[in-house]
Image: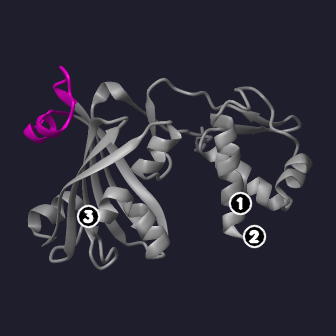
Amino acid sequence: MPRAKYQSIYRDMKQRIEAGERQAQDLLPSENTLVGFYGCSRNTVRRAIAALAEDGYVQSLHGVGVRVIYQPVTQTAFSMGGIESFRESALRNNKVPGTKVLNLFTMNVDDRIAARTGFPKGEEIYFLQRVRYLDEKPLILDLNMFLTSQVPGLTREIAENSVYDYIENELGMTIVTSKRWITVERVTELDEKWLDLGDYNCMAVITGQVYNADGIMFEYTQSRHRPDYFSFHDTAVRKKPLRL
C-alpha cells in the first residue's frame, strides 16, 4: 500500500473533523462509502482510521461504526502523543506561525552537554535557538541540538522555515520516536528578553529526545512555553493489568 495514499486520506479526514464537518459523537461514513470516495482499498482506509484513532480523533465501536470523539479546545493544543513540527501544530490550530533565529552554530559535545542531552561526548552538533511566534506574539523559546552527521547542511533559512520539512523531504530521513517530559520552571532572563510573558513568572517546559528509523538520537530539544496560552494533550488507552 502506498504510504502517501494512506497519509493523504488521514490528513483529509482529520482536517474535515477539525473544520466541524463531523461533530463529536457523529459516525463516519461506512467503510464502503470511504473506499468509493477516496478511490482506494479497504486496507488504506483502515490505516487512515487507525491513525485517527491513535491521535484521539475517532473511536471504532464493534457493530456500530467509527465515532468521532474529537472536541476542539480553546487554547492552542500541542500534541504529546505525536511528533509535529511547530509549523504543523500552529496551522492545525489555525494560528499564523513565525520564527526568529537567535543563534545557529556548531560545537562539540562536552561532559556537561552529554549528561544533559544524551548525545555521545565528542560528537559535533548544531546549537539552534529560536523564538516562535503565533499570530505575531512571541510565546515560545526553543532550543534545539542536532547531530551534524545526521542533519548536515542546516542553515538559518531552513531553521526559519521548518527543520523537519528539510529532514524528511530533502535529507530523506524518517523521524520515528520522541521521548518527552514536562516540567514547570521559573522564568529566565532569556525568557523575559525574548517572550511576551505578561505577569507570568514560570514556564511550561517540554524537553525531548528524538530518534530516527536507524535508532539514532539525532535531536535534543527544549521548548519553553508561556503557560496560559497552551494546553498539551495526549490520548491514552487503558490496558488490562496483568493478573498474578
Using the numbered discs, state the Cα–Cα distance from disc 2 to disc 3 in whole angstroms: 37 Å
Placement of the N terminus among the 4 image quadrants: bottom right
Q: Which residue carries the number 1 mark?
A: 6
Find residue 12 and report its horizontal and vertical position in percent.
69, 48
Tag 1: residue type?
Tyr
* Residue corresponding to mark 2: 1
Question: What is the number of the mark on residue 98?
Answer: none
Residue 152 visible (yes or no): yes
Q: Quadrant of the C terminus?
A: top right
Type of amino acid at the residue the image marks with label 3:
Arg
Q: Could you tell me which residue is drawn at 15 percent across and 38 percent down?
A: 191
Q: Is residue 173 visible?
A: no
Q: Position of residue 21 (x, y in %)?
A: 73, 32
Along the polypeptide, which appears first: circle 1 or circle 2?
2
- Residue 65 colored in magenta in the image: no
- Residue 100 placement (x, y as % from top left): 25, 50
Please report contact status of discs 1 and 2: CB closer than 8 Å, yes or no.
Answer: yes
Q: Is residue 7 left or right of residue 103?
A: right
Task: Tell which of 69 and 2 is nearer to you.
Answer: 2
